[in-house]
Image: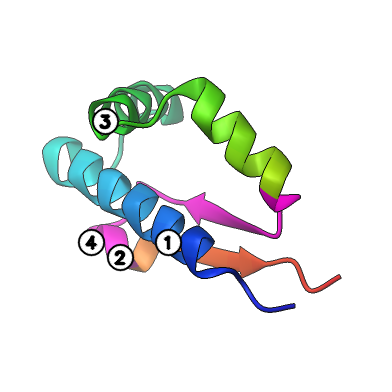
Amino acid sequence: MPVPPQLNELTYRIIACAIAVHRALGPGLLESAYRACLIAELRHAGFHEAQLVTYLKLANKPLGLLLNFNVPIMKSGIVRKINTD
């Protein structure tokens, strides 16, 4: 199942926010610290909870991101999975 271009753009923007958080905090903190900071960074980037829920509903969850902040370089802690069903 091909991924629509708008979903690719959305994931790139989310990854950019995750990289910004990782650069600011570095590796090795508790997940809750990264979660709180990522939420703040996503809001700063113009994402709001309702917008994210809308994207998920409209997209029927075809892909997801697994973000591991416990790595020296954030890029190596990102796994992008596409739902092939």
Seen as rendered, the residue at the extreme bottom is 2
Q: Is residue 35 above or below residue 9?
A: above
Q: CA distance from mark 1 to mark 2?
A: 6 Å
In the picture, residue 33 is in which quadrant? Answer: top left
Q: CA distance from mark 2 to mark 3?
A: 17 Å
The answer to which quarter of the image holds residue 21 is top left
**Scheme of image coloration:** rainbow
Neighbor class of circle 2 (other Cα within 10 Å; few <14, some 14-19, many 20+) is some
Which sits earlier in the primary sequence, circle 2 or circle 3? Answer: 3
Q: What is the number of the mark on residue 75?
A: 2
Q: Nearer the viewer, mark 1 or mark 3?
A: 3
Q: Which mark is residue 41?
A: 3
Amino acid on which disc 2 is placed: Lys
Q: Left or right: where does residue 60 sit relative to residue 33?
A: right
SS at mark 4? loop
Residue at the spot of label 4? 73
